[in-house]
Structures are given as C-alpha cells and as structure tokens.
Amino acid sequence: MPVYTMKETKPAPSTSKGVVFWLRENLFPDIKNSLLTLTGFYFLYLAIPPLLTWMIFDATWSGTQEEIVNEGARWIFIIEKFDQFIYGFYPESLHWRPNLVLLITVLFLGSFKFVGNIKVKIVAILTYPFICFVLISGGWFGLETVGTEKWGGLMLTLVVAAVGIIASFPIGIVLALGRQSDMPIVKTLCIGFIEFIRGVPLITILFMASVVLPLFFSDGIDFDKLLRALIGITLFQAAYIAEVVRGGLQAIPKGQYEAAKSLGLGYWQGMIFIILPQALKISIPNLVGSFISLFKDTTLVLIIGLFDILAMVTLTNSDTLWLGYEIEGYVFVTFIYWVICFSMSQYSKSIERKFNTEH
Amino acid sequence: MNKIQSSAPTGNGFLNNPQNRAIIYQLLALLFVLFLAYYFTSNMFENVEKRGITTGFSFLDDVAGFGISQTLIPYDDGASTYYDVFVVGLLNTLLVAIIGVFFASVLGLLIGIGRLSPNFLIAKLSLIYIETFRNIPILLQILFWYNVVLAALPSPRKSFTYFDSFFLNNRGLLTPEPIFESGSGFILIAFILAIIGVFFLARWAKKHHDLTGKEFPLFKVSIAILIFAPLLVYFISGQPISAEYPQLKGFNFKGGLTIIPELLALIFALSIYTATYIAEAVRAGIEAVPLGQKEAAKSLGLKEHVILRKVVLPQALRVIIPPVINQYLNLVKNSSLATAIGYPEVVTLFSGTTLNQVGQAIEIILMTMAVYLTISIVISLVLNWINAKMEIKGR
C-alpha cells in the first residue's frame, strides 16, 4: 500500500525572498524610485561622513585650548564650561543641592507606581514641591540662601518646565471644567481666558508678565524676575492643558455622566471619581505632547533676561577667552533638548499604542 | 450636553436647588473677577502716576527717530511716527508669515508624502527629518541659522554668486529688483482678468462634467491662461518691466533687492520647523482614508491618478486642512521670536525698541497682543468656514 509522504517544501525562489528581493522591493522597484534612492544615498554620502568626522574623529576631547590641532569639534569648550551650562551661577560648593533634588525627583517618580496608599501619595505630591524649593533656594533649616538671579543653565530650564507643568495642571483642569459647564458666566469667563491666551504668542505674555505685572500690585510687593516668568508660563500652559483636558472630557460617553448621577454622586464627586480619571487617562498622549511644547518653549525666558541653558551658551560665547565656540555650544544644547523631547514623544507614542485596541 | 447636576436634593432648602446654586457660584466667580480687575487697574493707575508715565495712545503721533533695517512702506528716521513703526512691524510680521507658510507647506507636503513612500530610504529619511527638527526648540533653530550658518557667510567682496545676478554674503541675499515702468499696470490687470477667467472656466468645467461626464483638462488650461495672458500683455505693451541688478561698488553692493540675513534665518528656521508638523498632518490625513475606498475605486476601473485626485485627496484633505491651518497660526506666533535676532517685526519694534523709548508698557504690549489676536481670530474664522464647507452632509 503506497504511503503518502509529504514532500519537503521547496525554498521560495530567490526573486521573492532574501536581501536582493528586499532591496528590489523597497529601494529599486522602478526607475523613478531607483533615482530617488540614489539621490537619497548621495545626500547621505554628502551629509554623514563630514558630520561624523567633525563630531567624533577630528574632535578634540581633552587638553587645553592651546593644544587644539584638529579641525573638528572642540568639545573641550563644553567640558570646560559644563558646570555653567548645568547650574548657571549657582555656587559651586552647593551643587549637591540641585543634584539631591534630581535624585529625589527620580526616586519620587520611580516609587510612585509601587505605593498603593492614596493618602501617602497625596502627602508626597503636596510635600515634594516644597522640599525641592527649600533645597534649591535655601533659607530654611540652616541652608544658605541662593537668590534666583544665580539660578541658571539646565537647572533653571528644568525648574521652569517643572513648575509650568505642575502648577498649570490644576488650573487647566478647572478651566476645562468651567468651559464645559452649563453656567453661562463661568463658561464665558473660561472661554475668554483660554482663547485669549491661545491667540497670542508666549513671548508677549512673558513681556506682559515681566513689564506689566509689577504694575498690577501695590508697591510693597516686590516680584522676583523668575517668579514673574513662572506666572506667565503657568497661565500660558494652563490654557493649553485646558484644551487638552476638554478633548478628554468630550470623549467620555454620556452614559458615564448619567451613571455617576444615578449613583447619587454630586458634581464634584462625579467628576473626581468617575469622569476625570477616565478623561485624564485618554488625554495622556496629548498632555505629554503639550509638555514637550512647554519644554521647548522654556527657551523663550532668555528673551526676558533669565539664564537658561541656551542663554548660558550665548553668554559663555562672549567670554573673551572662549570666542567663536558657538557651534559646539549650540550642538550641545540641541543634543540635550533633542534627547529629552524625543524620549518624551516616544513615551507618549507607546501609551497611545497601549490604548489603541482597534485593528 | 451631558452634565452632572448636583445630587438629588435632600431637603427643600434654597441652597439645595441646583439652579440657585448655579446662580450663586456664577455671581461669586463674577465678583471675584471684577474684584481682581478693579484691584489691578486701581493699582496700575496709582503706579503709573507715581512713576510719571503718561497714559493713552497719543505717543503714536510722536516722531520715533530710529532706523529700521527693512521697511515695506516709505519710512524716514527723522519724520516717521511710532504709528508708522507699528505698521512697518506689522507688515514685516505678515511678510515672514506669508513666505514662511509657503515654504513650510511645500516642504511639509513633500516630506509627508515621502513618509508614506514605498521607498524604504525615502520613508526613513523623511522620518528622521521629522523627528530631528520637531524636537529642537524653534528659538534654538533660529539662533543657530543666524549665529552659526549665516554668520559664516563671506563678506560682500567674496560673495557666493549665482547666475551673475544672485549674491549671497553676510549682508544677506541680493537679488535683481524688478523695475516697474509705466504700462506695467496692464500686466497686473491682465493677470487679475486671467484669474477671474480661470474661476469661471472651472465652474463651466464642473458643470460640463456633471452634464456630459466629459473631463475638461482644467489644470493644464488654467496654468496656460495664467502664464500666457500676462506674458502676451507684457510683450504688447513694450516690455515695461526691467530688472536692476546688484552691483559691487567698493565694499558693498548697490542696487538690487536685499533680503536681510535676519529674514533668511527666520524663514529657514520657521519653514523647516513648521514643515515637520505639516508633514505629520499630511501623513495622518492620507492614512485616515480607509483602504476600502481605494480598493472600491480600483474595482470601478479608475486609473491611479484619478483615484488619488477624486477619491483619496478629497477625503484626506478634510482631515489635513484643520491641523495645517493651526500650524500656520503657530508659525505666525513663532515669528515673534524674531526679536531674539533683531528682525524688525512687530514684537521687536514695538514691544522692544518703542517700549524702551516710550515706557508705556501697557498700551504697547496690548497693541502687540491685539495684532496676534486679530490674526488668530481671522485664521480661526477661515478654519470654521472651511470646516463648515467640507463637512460631510448627512442625508
């Protein structure tokens, strides 16, 4: 009796698999695309080798200014001025304080997932800004006071971004709820505020905060320059957060609102326990997007005379011993901003993928 | 809208009535805002008086007395007023906005299509472009172009020369300047007439297509009309437009049109930055068209370019246009960063120089904000109009 044995499957022909197939399919499918590919490669050939040579192979990584012989990037400028880029004019002996704040922040964010108790969380959230402020600014517990005029560099950038993000969040949520509310006066006020802020550039708001805001208060109140900028940035960011949260609120089905009502929950109870947790969750990607914009916008404080990392680069360039090192400085700042913004955007994308359950 | 009203009343008290509560909350909010406004304005007037700053807009009639590197209207250092400065700044803002929007759109469209290209290399290069320039602050890009790239350009005597008529050096880009002699108005009239003609032709072509099903080569004919009608008038009226070429005289160029380096840096940075967002919008829009639409069109036997033009694009545009217009608005707002490199637009001239000279911060900053508010209101009205026009009409 003949036994049926399966034949070994033949390997696919070389025209439909393998490197050659991939190349033909993706790079050289027809004449038009082949030309495009070649142009692309030529462009890469023009751009990549000189860039790598400048940045790495011909670069000067150590030594003193006099010893520079290479044509490439002179990274010793960055190494020499590194402390100024990171801490601004913050006294060198006290650098441990911002460092400690960074450590606390990392621990704070890292441990947040593992703490279940909501009360601990709330206490932590409320004390965290206070601890950070005391550590950086000093003045309490025998810590030496460091005036805000000495804050600078990446530290200042992060302070501005963090305050802008944290302080604008509650204001933004209240504005979003106000805009969605049934009460005509509250609604009008919120819409007016949001649309006004969104209609003007941040730089005019910063000018307003730095020049006009002091006029709004009686003479006794002395405003710190940094505080003025922070108020401007917070109000600006709050309007954008409000629009993002509104998007989330509008995406929550009507049934959720009715369910909250039918459980006998009041407006605030329903919002806090039913609606906002869902609305904020679906807004996370857009919120992160708005944080990225804010982080990039922190560079604007240099226009009103604060020394963020970009301003520090401009400033160190006017150091007569280090003239003509703009490129290295700008590349360094670009790198820092790019790494932070890119990782935030990848994080936002990963969350979006997690939420995306459609096929 | 679905809103949670306050919970079911437990008693019949006045405060338990949701409507009464709403009124009280609103009154409180209104009182709070009014109080803030009163507090701020009264302090403001007090402070302004104490510092001896004049108020009101009469400063607009005073002579400004400073020079501006780029003016689109006649401007005289000794005679022009602050109002003229304002107009110069406004026009310079609009100039950047229009040029920037044009280049950002072209670049963004190309990159966005490149992102969806079946060509692996092109798709990846587009992705790298987007991810690189989107994540670098726009101010940093402006400063980089201005302080690094354009500052490295040679002096006028050693300029880069293209076709003997374009010169690029550290004073900017010099191009031939068109000189309009008498009779050139006819060319403009011919051009306007050509546009009107094309408009009616398009209406006729659509009607013709609806009635007979025959396709009229509208695009090619329109382009031909738009080019040849003014060209014909140009030759008939005796070539009234000539060009003045920039000439090297001594250490600098004379004649021609100079595009100042500040403007160049701003255009480069704004177009490259905004193009990344436009590219993403274009990609998202094209991807939003369901695959079934293309397959359905194919199964009807439509050709590839007809599918793109009649099936994919109309649906994609509905998704693409709103975010792109928002990006245009962002570009206009970002153009205010020109103040960092001293390009004479409304923030630099008005919130910068004029504020320093006059000191009337409130009026000046409010006027500057009003410029941008007006622009954004106009843009959002246009957007609403487009949205209403493109809305899918349910039957």
Image (cartoon, grey):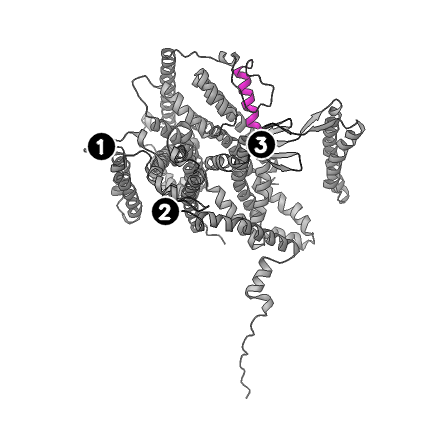
Is residue B169 positioned above or below B186 on the image?
below
Residue located beneath label 2 in the image: A62
Rendering coords of residue B21 (x, y %): 36, 27
Residue located beneath label 3 in the image: B156
Q: Earlier in the sequence, mark 1 or mark 2?
A: 2
Depth order, front residue of B388/A342 = A342
Q: Residues at marks 2 and 3, common chain?
A: no
Q: CA distance from mark 1 to mark 2?
A: 35 Å
**Which kind of residue does numbered mark 2 sit on?**
Ser
- Of the numbered discs in the image, which one, if any, rests on residue A144? 1
Q: Is residue A353 magenta?
A: no
Q: CA distance from mark 2 to mark 3?
A: 37 Å
* Chain of the residue that carries numbered disc 2 in the rendered image: A
Depth order, front residue of A308/B15 = A308
Q: Residues within 10 Å of mark 2 (few under 14, many from 20)?
A: some
The magenta stretch spans which residues?
A: B79-96
Snapshot quadrant of residue B47: top left
Is residue B176 positioned above or below A275 on the image?
above
Q: Secondary structure at mark 2?
A: loop
